[in-house]
Image (cartoon, coloured by chain):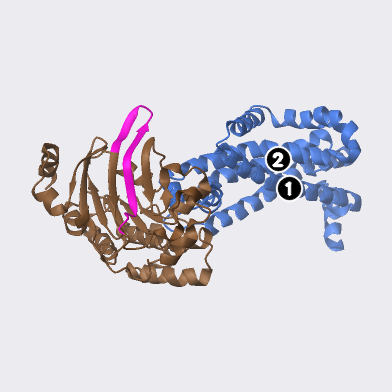
Chain colours: A blue, B brown
C-alpha cells in the first residue's frame, strides 16, 4: 500500500489536496476506527431498532390496553422530540442519574446505541404497524380458522406479509438511522464525524475533510440501499404487491 | 330431519374415527357430562353439528335471532337467503370465529359456545375447516405450502407425511401441476380449489363453505363446484352458504332459507324450491330463479 500512500503525499505537495487520512499513519488509524465505529453503530442500531419495531408492532395488536398505551406513548415521545435532545437526555440526563448505579460501565457509545435504537425503533413500530394493518383481516381469519394460534398467525402469516409491505418505508428509516449516527458526535462518541473533526482541527484541512465525509457517507448509505433493494427482490413473491 | 340422514361411505383421506378420540383430551369436554370420547361414532344418529336458539348481535344490531338446526354426519346443508341475513355470521359462529350471545352450538364433541381460550378454539378448528369467499390463501407461500402449513404447525404432523397428503389433495382438486405456484399466479378458481385442499388437509369432520363461488366468473364456478360435489359424494359433512341455487338443489340434503337473522323455511331442496310454504321464500326465489 505504500506507493498509494506516497501518491497521496505527492498529491498534497503538488495540489494542496491534503488527505492525511491516507498518507499519515496516525490519521489513517483514527479515521479507520471512526469509520468502523459508524458501521458498528449503524448495524447494532439497525438490528435493535428492528427488534423494537417488531415487538412494538406486536404489542400494539395486544388485547391488553395498558401494553398498547405504553407503546403508544413511547412512539409519541420519540417521534415528537429531536433525536439530539433524546441523545442528551439519555447521556447527560439518565446517564448521570444512573451513574451511581451502573458506575462507568455504561459508556457514551452504549448510550448512543440505546438512544438511536429507541429513536429509529419508534418509527419502525409505526412502519410495521401500517404493514400489519395492510394485511387483509380475512387472511388472518383464514389462519385462525385453520387453528393457528395468535402467535403462530403473527409469525407465519401476518408478519411475513407485513414485512414485505413495510420494506420500502423501512428502507427509508434505516437510511435515516445511519445518517443520524452522526449525532453521537455530540456526546463525544468517536464515530466518523467526530474523528474527522479531530483530524481537521489538527491538520487544518477542513474543506478536504468535508468532501471526504460526504463521499464516505454516500458510499456507506449506498451499500445499505443496495443491500436492502436486493433483499426486497429476494423476498418478492410473484403476484403479491407490485 | 330424518330424510336428511344420507348414509355415504366415508373414504380414507377424510375419515378420522381414531383422531376424533385423540382430539378430545384437553378440549372442551366436561368430565362430568358423561360425554365420553367414544360417544361420537359415525352412524350413532347424533347430529355432528347442532345449533339451538343461537342469538348473535353486533352492538345493538341483532344478526341472528334464534337459529336452530342440526346436521347429521355426512349431511349437506345449504343456507340461502338475501345479503345481510346473517348467513356468513352463522358459519363463523360454528367454528368459533365469532362468539354468540346466547343459545348453544355443538360440533362433534365441542360445545362451541363455551369455548373461551385460544387453545380450546384451536382444538375445535381441527374438526371444522372453512373455505372463504375471497379464498384467503397465504400469498407468500406456494400452493403446496398453503396446504401443508396447518397440518405441520397446528397438528404437528411429520413434514414428509403431510407433504404426501398435500400432493394427493392438490391432485384431487386438479392442481398437481400448480404446486409451486404462488396464489398471485393462480386464477380465482384455482386459488379457491387450493383453499379447499388446504381446508381438507386438516382432515376435518365438517367443512364450511362461505359463498365460495361468489367472487368467481361463471366459467370457473364450475370447477370449484365440481370439487365440492365430489367431497359431498364422499361423505364429507358440508355446510354451504351459497347463491348457486341449482347447485344447492342438486347437492343439498336440506336447504335453509334465512332472512333477517331467522330461518324462515327449511326442507329438502325439492320441496323448498318447488313448493315453498312461506311468502317470503316465494318472493326470494322468484327473484333469483
The CA distance from mark 2 to mark 1 is 8 Å
Q: Which residue is mark 1?
A: A44
Q: List x then y, in percent, for residue B276.
A: 11, 45
Q: Is residue A105 above or below residue A43?
A: above
Q: Secondary structure at mark 2?
A: helix
Q: Residue visible at 59% across and 39% down?
A: A59
Quadrant housing residue B44: bottom left
Q: Which disc, if any, is residue B28?
A: none
Q: Is residue A162 above or below residue B19?
A: above
Considering depth in this image, is A19 or A26 the residue closer to the camera? Answer: A26
Q: List x then y, in percent, for residue A162.
A: 52, 47
Label 2 environment density (alpha carbons within 10 Å; few <14, some 14–19, many ≥20) = many
- Chain identity of mark 1: A
Over which residues does the magenta segment extend?
B45-66
Considering depth in this image, is B241 or B30 the residue closer to the camera? Answer: B30
Residue A8 appearing in the image: yes
How would you classify the magenta stretch by its main secondary structure? strand
Q: List x then y, in percent, for residue B275.
A: 8, 47
Q: Is residue A47 above or below residue A4?
A: above
Q: Secondary structure at mark 1?
A: helix
- Number of callouts: 2
- Chain identity of mark 2: A
Q: On the same chain: label 2 and label 1?
A: yes
Q: Is residue B56 magenta?
A: yes
* Contact flag, marks 2 and 1 (Cβ < 8 Å): yes
Residue B211 appearing in the image: no
Q: Which residue is mark 2?
A: A117
Amino acid at each position: 500500500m505504500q506507493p498509494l500512500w506516497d501518491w497521496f503525499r505527492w498529491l498534497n505537495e503538488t495540489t494542496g489536496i491534503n488527505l492525511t487520512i491516507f498518507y499519515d499513519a496516525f490519521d489513517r488509524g483514527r479515521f479507520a476506527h471512526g469509520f468502523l465505529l459508524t458501521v458498528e453503530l449503524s448495524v447494532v442500531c439497525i438490528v435493535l431498532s428492528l427488534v423494537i419495531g417488531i415487538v412494538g408492532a406486536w404489542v400494539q395488536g395486544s388485547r391488553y390496553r395498558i401494553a398498547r398505551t405504553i407503546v403508544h406513548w413511547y412512539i409519541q415521545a420519540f417521534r415528537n422530540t429531536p433525536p439530539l435532545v433524546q441523545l442528551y437526555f439519555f447521556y447527560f440526563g439518565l446517564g448521570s442519574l444512573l451513574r451511581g448505579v451502573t458506575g462507568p460501565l455504561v459508556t457514551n457509545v452504549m448510550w448512543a446505541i440505546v438512544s438511536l435504537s429507541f429513536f429509529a425503533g419508534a418509527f419502525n413500530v409505526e412502519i410495521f404497524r401500517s404493514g400489519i394493518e395492510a394485511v387483509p383481516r380475512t387472511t388472518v381469519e383464514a389462519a385462525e380458522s385453520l387453528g393457528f394460534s395468535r402467535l403462530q398467525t403473527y409469525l407465519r402469516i401476518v408478519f411475513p406479509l407485513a414485512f414485505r409491505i413495510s420494506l420500502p418505508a423501512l428502507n427509508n428509516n434505516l437510511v435515516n438511522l445511519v445518517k443520524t449516527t452522526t449525532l453521537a458526535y455530540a456526546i463525544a462518541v468517536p464515530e466518523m464525524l467526530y474523528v474527522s473533526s479531530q483530524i481537521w482541527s489538527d491538520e487544518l484541512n477542513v474543506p478536504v475533510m468535508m468532501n471526504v465525509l460526504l463521499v464516505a457517507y454516500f458510499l456507506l448509505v449506498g451499500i445499505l440501499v443496495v443491500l436492502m433493494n436486493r433483499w426486497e427482490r429476494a423476498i418478492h413473491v410473484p403476484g403479491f404487491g407490485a | 330431519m330424518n330424510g336428511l340422514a344420507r348414509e355415504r361411505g366415508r373414504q380414507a383421506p377424510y375419515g378420522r374415527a381414531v383422531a376424533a378420540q385423540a382430539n378430545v383430551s384437553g378440549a372442551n369436554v366436561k368430565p362430568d357430562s358423561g360425554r365420553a370420547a367414544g360417544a361420537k361414532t359415525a352412524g350413532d344418529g347424533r347430529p355432528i353439528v347442532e345449533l339451538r336458539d343461537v342469538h348473535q348481535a353486533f352492538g345493538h344490531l341483532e344478526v341472528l335471532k334464534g337459529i336452530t338446526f342440526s346436521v347429521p354426519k355426512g349431511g349437506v346443508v345449504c343456507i340461502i337467503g338475501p345479503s345481510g341475513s346473517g348467513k356468513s355470521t352463522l358459519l363463523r359462529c360454528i367454528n368459533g370465529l365469532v362468539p354468540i350471545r346466547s343459545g348453544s352450538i355443538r360440533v362433534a364433541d365441542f360445545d362451541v359456545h363455551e369455548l373461551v381460550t385460544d387453545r380450546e378454539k384451536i382444538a375445535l378448528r381441527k374438526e371444522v375447516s372453512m373455505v372463504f369467499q375471497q379464498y384467503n390463501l397465504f400469498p407468500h407461500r406456494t400452493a403446496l405450502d398453503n396446504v401443508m402449513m396447518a397440518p405441520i404447525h397446528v397438528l404437528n404432523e411429520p413434514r414428509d407425511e403431510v407433504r404426501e397428503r398435500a400432493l394427493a389433495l392438490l391432485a384431487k382438486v386438479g392442481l398437481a401441476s400448480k404446486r409451486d405456484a404462488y396464489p398471485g399466479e393462480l386464477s380465482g378458481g384455482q386459488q379457491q380449489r387450493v383453499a379447499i385442499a388446504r381446508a381438507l388437509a386438516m382432515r376435518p369432520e365438517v367443512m364450511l363453505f362461505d359463498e365460495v363461488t361468489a367472487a368467481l366468473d361463471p366459467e370457473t364456478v364450475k370447477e370449484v363446484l365440481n370439487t365440492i360435489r365430489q367431497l359431498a359424494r364422499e361423505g364429507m359433512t358440508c355446510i354451504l352458504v351459497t347463491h348457486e341455487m341449482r347447485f344447492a338443489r342438486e347437492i343439498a340434503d336440506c336447504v335453509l332459507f334465512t332472512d333477517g337473522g331467522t330461518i324462515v323455511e327449511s326442507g329438502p331442496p325439492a320441496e323448498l324450491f318447488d313448493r315453498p310454504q312461506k311468502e317470503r321464500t316465494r318472493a326470494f326465489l322468484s327473484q333469483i330463479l
